[in-house]
Image: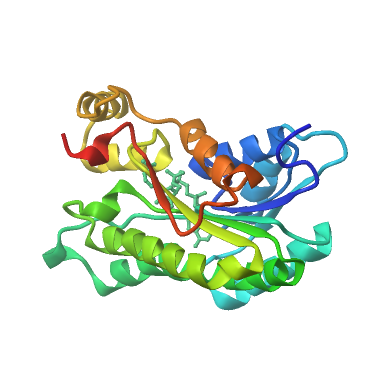
Amino acid sequence: MGRFDGRIAVITGAARGIGFGTATRFAEEGASVAIVDLDESAAGDAAARLPLADGVRAIGVGANVSDEASVDAAFERIVAEFGGVHVLVNNAGITRDNLLFKMTGEDWDLVMGVHLKGAFLMTRAAQKHFVEQKYGKVVNISSTSALGNRGQANYSAAKMGVQGLTRTLGIELGPFGINVNAVAPGFIATEMTDATAARLKMDVEEFRALNAEHNPVRRVGEPADIAAAVTFLASDEASYITGQTLYVDGGVSLGV
Ligand code: NAI
């Protein structure tokens, strides 16, 4: 018996990184999974790599979470394929880091569009089904950068915005049997943090080691660390938890 037997989970940005790690954990625990990502073939390839339980399926859906028509079409397709949806993980993300004086309006809009508008659009599409069935779990991915991070005014604002969205939707949707929570990861070894290393002209391993050194638990995180928290919050064990943001960061947000 898996915690997600008979459940259908939609995970955005799951063609790789934290999203793929999370999709893997849902699949291992019995869920059918829809991987939503920009490129349909990358999403399909990722879906084909999931460890599926007997009788369940995974599909890859190409969609841009910051585009209303694209999100609504993706949701329709997922519901038509699976006959419903129970869990939504808003994980898709990008960075466009720069100090304020160099940050363009386009960099601001792009980051806000994917993280904040994306979570809004996806959750609005999901709630129609969740409210009808009086059951739904939303887990949004925030970040320790929400607390403030040099060079990430756009990303930090979007990620703190995600926490506000989470609290508000917790209030609005709670009466309909829907839990809305967030996970705020610290440094997780993925292509996103590897790209940051490249931008800082640092070796990937050196960059990870540096981040591990400044972390109370003295290591960087892996996608599986985030998947464990997301699946807990999406499970029925967490049905009395809503509107919360759980920092999964090895203690780095403690500021020691
Ligand atoms: P990643 O860059 O490895 O993966 C992000 C995925 O999102 C990619 O597959 C990408 O194609 C997809 N994506 C981007 N824009 C999209 C759009 N408009 N529509 C649909 N899909 C889109 O990143 P990673 O590290 O796996 O990050 C996942 C989430 O975790 C992001 O929200 C990120 O901000 C957050 N996060 C990551 C941390 C880290 O240290 N890696 C730390 C804190 C938060």
Q: Taking 232 as reference, is 117 above or below it?
A: below
- Colour treatment of the image: rainbow
Q: Taking 187 as reference, is 240 above or below it?
A: below
Residue beneath the point at 27% across and 58% down: 156
Where residue 161 sits: x, y (%)? 35, 66
Q: In the displayed orientation, state which residue is furthest to the left.
A: 101
Q: In the displayed orientation, state which residue is furthest to the bottom.
A: 69
Where residue 159 sits: x, y (%)? 35, 58
Viewer-proximal residue among 136 and 227: 136
Residue beneath the point at 45% across and 71% down: 117
Q: Quadrant of the N terminus?
A: top right
Q: Quadrant of the C terminus?
A: top left
Residue beneath the point at 61% across and 42% down: 237
Viewer-proximal residue among 29 and 52: 29
Where residue 160 sits: x, y (%)? 32, 61
Viewer-proximal residue among 236 and 209: 236
Residue beneath the point at 20% across and 29% down: 214
Q: For residue 254, which quarter of the picture?
A: top left
Viewer-proximal residue among 132 and 64: 132
